[in-house]
C-alpha cells in the first residue's frame, strides 16, 4: 500500500476524496444512543457522553460506508474526560456493530479500555492490538491512521514544564510533529469499504464518561 505522502497532489482537488469536518453541520452523522447516553454538538465540539447508568452507549458514524482504510489517512483531534472504567473507539470499521476490546471484525482504530490506549487492526478473522504508552487522552491531542500505521501529534508540555514565566512577554517556538507510535502488519483491514465510527460506553454505574472531538480530516488518494 503506498503511503499517502508519497503520492503527489497539489491540493485537496488532487485527491480522490477530502473531508474537513469541524462539526458545524452534522446532518451526515448518524447516532445510536442507549440508556443515559447522549450527544451534544456545536461548532468545533462534538461531545459524546454516557451519562451515569452502567453500559450506556453513545455511538456515531458517517452515514455511508465509503471510507477506505487501505488508501487513505484519517485524523481526529479529541480528548476524554477520563480514561478509566470505559471502552472507547474511533477509527475505520466494517460494520455498525458495537466495537469490543478484542474484536476481530475488519477495522483500524484507536481503542481506550480501562485506562489504557491501544492501536488495533483486524481482518475479519484475527486482531492485532498494541498498547500505546505515555499518552494522556485527557489532554487535546491529534491521532492519525494510515492503513496499519498509527500516529499521535502530542500537544506541547504543560506551561510549567516549558519554563515559561508567570506573565510571559515572549513565547518560545514550539514545533508539533507527527510521531509514529505503531505499525501493525499482521491483520490489516480486508477491503476499501468501511465506516468511520466513534464510540464510548461506561462499564461501571454512576460514572459519566465523555469523549470530545474537535476536528476530523479524511484524505483519500486514487486507488484504481
Image (cartoon, grey):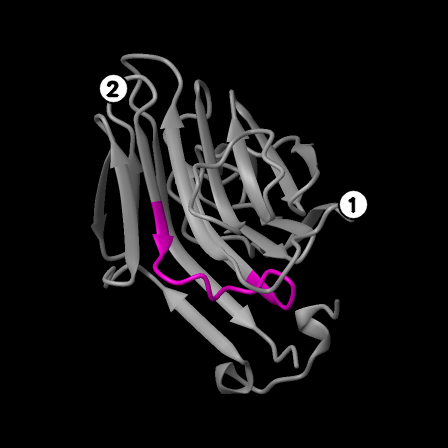
Residue 142 disc label: none
Q: Is residue 161 left or right of residue 121?
A: left
Q: Of circles 2 and 1, which is in front?
A: 1
Q: Is residue 74 left or right of residue 189?
A: left
Magenta range:
60-73
- Within 10 Å of the Cα at label 2, are there few (<14), some (14-19), or many (20+) other Cα atoms? some
5 shown above or below 155: below
What kind of element bears circle 2?
loop
Chief SS of the magenta region: loop
Location of residue 97 in the rendering, given as x and y in whole percent from the top left corner: 44, 41
Q: Nearer the viewer, residue 30 or 52?
A: 30
Extreme residue in the front direction:
125
Mark 2 or mark 1: name the one nearer the start of the chain.
2
Residue designated by label 1: 186
Residue 52 disc label: 2
Q: Nearer the viewer, residue 54 or 151?
A: 54
Snapshot quadrant of residue 202: top left
Snapshot quadrant of residue 126: top right
Amino acid at each position: 500500500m503506498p503511503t499517502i505522502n508519497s503520492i503527489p497532489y497539489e491540493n485537496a482537488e488532487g485527491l480522490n476524496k477530502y473531508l474537513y469536518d469541524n462539526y458545524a453541520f452534522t446532518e451526515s452523522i448518524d447516532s445510536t444512543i442507549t440508556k443515559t447516553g447522549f450527544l451534544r454538538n456545536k461548532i468545533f465540539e462534538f461531545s459524546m457522553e454516557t451519562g451515569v447508568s452502567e453500559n450506556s452507549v453513545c455511538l456515531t458514524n458517517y452515514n455511508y460506508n465509503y471510507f477506505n482504510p487501505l488508501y487513505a489517512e484519517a485524523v481526529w483531534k479529541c480528548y476524554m474526560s477520563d480514561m478509566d472504567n470505559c471502552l472507547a473507539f474511533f477509527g475505520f470499521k466494517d460494520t455498525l456493530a458495537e466495537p469490543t476490546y478484542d474484536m476481530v471484525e475488519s477495522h483500524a482504530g484507536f481503542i481506550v479500555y480501562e485506562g489504557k490506549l491501544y492501536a488495533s487492526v483486524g481482518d475479519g478473522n484475527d486482531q492485532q492490538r498494541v498498547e500505546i504508552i505515555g499518552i494522556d487522552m485527557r489532554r487535546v491531542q491529534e491521532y492519525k491512521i494510515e492503513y496499519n500505521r498509527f500516529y499521535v501529534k502530542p500537544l506541547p508540555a504543560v506551561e510549567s514544564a516549558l519554563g515559561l514565566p508567570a506573565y510571559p512577554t515572549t513565547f518560545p517556538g514550539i514545533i508539533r510533529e507527527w510521531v509514529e507510535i505503531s505499525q501493525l502488519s499482521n491483520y490489516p483491514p480486508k477491503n476499501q469499504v468501511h465506516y468511520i465510527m466513534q464510540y464510548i460506553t461506561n462499564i461501571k454505574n454512576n460514572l459519566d464518561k465523555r469523549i470530545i472531538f474537535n476536528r476530523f480530516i479524511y484524505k483519500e488518494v486514487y486507488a484504481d
